[in-house]
Amino acid sequence: MNKQIALNDRLVKTIGIPALGLFIPNLSGLITNRLYTPSELAACYLFFIVVAFLVWEGNVRLMYYIREKFPWSKIAYSKIIIALFFANIVYSGAVSLLLLRLWQFCAKEPQGENQHLINSVLIIIIAACFITNIYEILFLNLEKEYNETRVEQLNVAKAQAELEALKNQIDPHFIFNSLNTLSFLITRDPKSARLYNDTLARVYRYILSNKERDLVLLREEVEFISNYFYLLKIRFADAISMSIEITDLSAENYLIPPISLQALVENAIKHNEFSEKKPLAIDVSISSDHVIVRNVMNRRSNPQPTSKIGLSNLDNRYKLITKRNIQVENNFESFVVKLPIVRF
């Protein structure tokens, strides 16, 4: 950070140091211009500029050293600032007094006149403290920007890591349920098992191609959930039904996290009892801001073991990707989940 400040203050130094070298001797009355030839006057002001440079650069390097050497905490901040300004005063006063006193021995100014010298030293000390204050403000602003940027980068990295972890939960979850279904069909209906396996390959291809994406077109997700529901129909036949009230036109205009509808259908299958006499009906529709998934509730008397990552996973993914939460409504007759959608 210090290097960056040193680079950024080059223009200020180029203007400020000569300005101080020209301004301070005249303000304090240290030099009487008419007593010198043009060449002598140029040499005098060149000397004053060198003094200004040594005071300015010395104070900056002193600040670098103190900031690097001592830990800056809220508790010790005031003490360090006092020490820094004290060091600036001592350094600026000593350097300017020594060099300007040396100049006086060679100058054409009246001897024995020290008031102008004292005025010059005081002005240099005040200027040094002012410059130090400006640099300190610059340091604090840069540190604040750096810390804010660092916090933002850490938050992004944390969110990305959490999102990747949540995405990775989809694969074993989906495989576990699919293999259970395939195992069931192999023993009961080998022909359906083969069809199921082929369709499963197409469904899983969608998962593999979209698992790294945060959002997909709603149309793509609707096509996927239709294929996925076909797998369920192979096993459950007329015991389940699903209606999708989303037009192709509306599905082209929105984005949604991938595999989100599948998680809700899977959740309904897992937690409800259903049969051909009392089928499980799942409705998927769209409003202005949400995709709505609704199913009639008929809770299982003996709930299946669950990893409890379904809805929680989906809600966390939504929170990380869209900064919005899913909405869950349960009135013990129907179970409704509203998924926020992103306009394309």
Image (cartoon, rainbow, N blue to C red):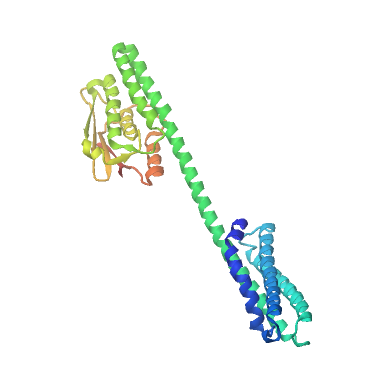
Classify 12 as above or below 168: below
Looking at the rendering, in which quadrant would you find the C terminus?
top left
Left or right, 60 with respect to 332, comes to right
Classify 63 as above or below 46: above
Q: Percent from the top left, x then y, of residue 118?
A: 72, 82
Left or right, 170 with respect to 64, comes to left
- Pick the front one: 240 or 273: 240
- Pick the front one: 288 or 29: 29
Q: Percent from the top left, x then y, of residue 298?
A: 27, 31
Residue 57 visible in the snapshot:
yes
Left or right, 194 with respect to 238, comes to right
- Pick the front one: 233 or 267: 233
Q: Percent from the top left, x then y, of residue 75?
A: 63, 62
Looking at the rendering, in which quadrant would you find the N terminus?
bottom right
Q: Percent from the top left, x then y, of residue 180?
A: 37, 20
Q: Residue at x 31, y 28 (%)?
A: 269
Q: In which quarter of the image is residue 337?
A: top left
Q: Quadrant of residue 15?
A: bottom right
- Pick the front one: 300 or 173: 173
Numbered disc total: 0
Q: In which quarter of the image is residue 133?
A: bottom right
Q: Which residue is drawn at 31% across and 37% down?
A: 217
Residue 329 visible in the snapshot:
no
